[in-house]
Amino acid sequence: MLHLVTTIAVLDALPGGRISQGDDIVLQGSAVSAARRGHRQNSVLTALVDDRCGLHAMADRLQAFGIAPSAMLAGVAAIDYDALVELTVKHPLIHTWA
């Protein structure tokens, strides 16, 4: 399944039972701020990576938030729109968390 996370508040409430090993998560909107190393939500993101989920953040939003690649949490991949489309093809089931 592909999970689109659009707000930082959603990360606090992500139900663990709804995200499974092999799922991909894309941080969009304000949720990309959690990809900055040292953010209070880093433990949530690290747990997702440890659970073997793919963790991605939209590159245009990272740039808008001033998050350079060198400042990103390990395990988070910056992706562009084309890569997002590829993830939607890979995962026919998509859930948006807003």
Image: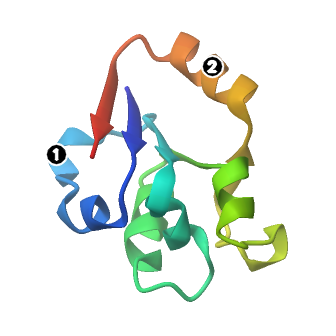
> Looking at the picture, which amino acid does disc 2 mark?
Val
User: Which residue is drawn at the image coordinates 31% and 35% (left, top)?
Assistant: 96
Left or right: residue 28 compared with residue 43: right
Left or right: residue 37 compared with residue 8: right
Between residues 2 and 9, which one lies in front from this camera angle?
9
**What SS does tag 2 mark?**
helix
User: Which residue is drawn at the image coordinates 36% and 65% (left, top)?
Assistant: 8
Q: Where is residue 11 in the image (x, y as percent from the top left)?
A: 31, 63
Label placed on residue 28: none
Label placed on residue 85: 2
The quadrant the N terminus occupies is top left
Residue 95 lies in what quarter of the image? top left
Residue 87 lies in what quarter of the image? top right
> Which residue lies under the disc numbered 1?
17
Q: Where is residue 43 in the image (x, y as percent from the top left)?
A: 41, 77
User: Which residue is drawn at the image coordinates 42% and 35% (left, top)?
Assistant: 23
Between residues 75 and 97, which one lies in front from this camera angle?
97
Q: Between disc 2 and disc 1, whose residue precedes? A: 1
Vertical comparison of 47 with 78: above or below = below
Q: Where is residue 27 in the image (x, y as percent from the top left)?
A: 50, 51
The answer to whether marks 2 and 1 mark residues whose Cβ atoms lie closer than 8 Å is no
* Mark 2 nearby-residue class (10 Å; few <14, some 14–19, many ≥20): few
* Residue furthest to the front: 64
Residue 40 lies in what quarter of the image? bottom left
Left or right: residue 69 compared with residue 93: right
Inter-mark Cα distance, 2 to 1: 25 Å
Between residues 56 and 54, which one lies in front from this camera angle?
56
Vertical comparison of 14 with 33: above or below = above
Vertical comparison of 82 with 58: above or below = above
Left or right: residue 81 compared with residue 34: right
> Looking at the picture, which amino acid does disc 1 mark?
Gly
